[in-house]
Image: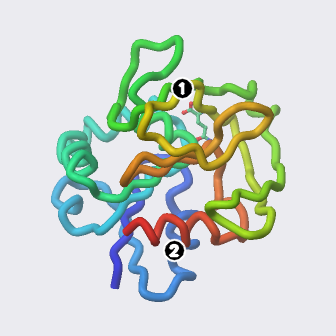
Amino acid sequence: MIRVGVLDMQGSVIEHVEMLQHIEGIQPIRVKYPNQIGEIDGLILPGGESTAIGKLIKDFGIYQSLKERMIQGMPVWGTCAGMILLAKKIIGEETVHLGVMDIDVRRNAYGRQIDSFRIEKRIPMVSENPIPLVFIRAPYIERVGKTVEILAEHEGKIIAARQNNMLVTSFHPELTEDMSFYRYFLQMI
Ligand code: GLN
């Protein structure tokens, strides 16, 4: 069994857990406490509110062990707010959360909640066919470091990328039926 954690502070935790439950050989684990960090083979940082999640990982005393395991190479996938948590820089803000991935992101880059949207796109590294992508007050990436691979762009903005053990997506695969990104992430584990 591969144990895939979902960071359980705030946001779309249950939705990721339910998607993982559909995959054979995967045991989803809701991660809240520092002692759980050593028990997982990979971790999903869900969408939600990055400011709240960033504060809670400190309050729950999980920040340091999370960051260490990511630097040591634990596979991690940040969706939406999760992408913001991983970024080295948040444009226009002083805040840096985990700061482990060499990307600069812009928060709420597409406007307000009402400007949320859904598109279909083929992402060659991830799926042969077009897949649904759901954006909710989504960030996009404005700069990537040399070792970051761009996986997808939309209207000239980077919306999915990977740097070694770290994967980020602006959108929410857990709010669709499509498993392509889960399969891609599991290959990283
Ligand atoms: N707007 C949120 C933030 O900045 C992210 C939204 C999401 O995760 N769907 O944290």
- The residue wearing badge 2 is 20
The answer, for residue 47, to whether it is visible in the render is: no
- The residue wearing badge 1 is 143
Q: Is residue 139 left or right of residue 74?
A: right
Task: Determine whether 14 is above or below 115 in the image.
Answer: below
Residue at point 24%, 40% (across, down): 63
User: Which numbered disc, 2 or 1, marks the residue closer to the eye?
Assistant: 1
**Foreground residue, 112 or 25?**
25
Label 1 crowd (10 A; few <14 / some 14-19 / many >=20): some
**Foreground residue, 92 or 60?**
92
- Quick one: label 2 or label 1, which is nearer the N terminus? 2
Q: Is residue 143 left or right of residue 119?
A: left
Residue at point 19%, 53% (across, down): 34
Position of residue 79 measured from the top left corner of the image (x, y, whole percent): 54, 48
The answer, for residue 139, to whether it is visible in the render is: yes
Task: Determine whether 71 is above or below 93 in the image.
Answer: below
State the quadrant of the C terminus.
Answer: bottom left
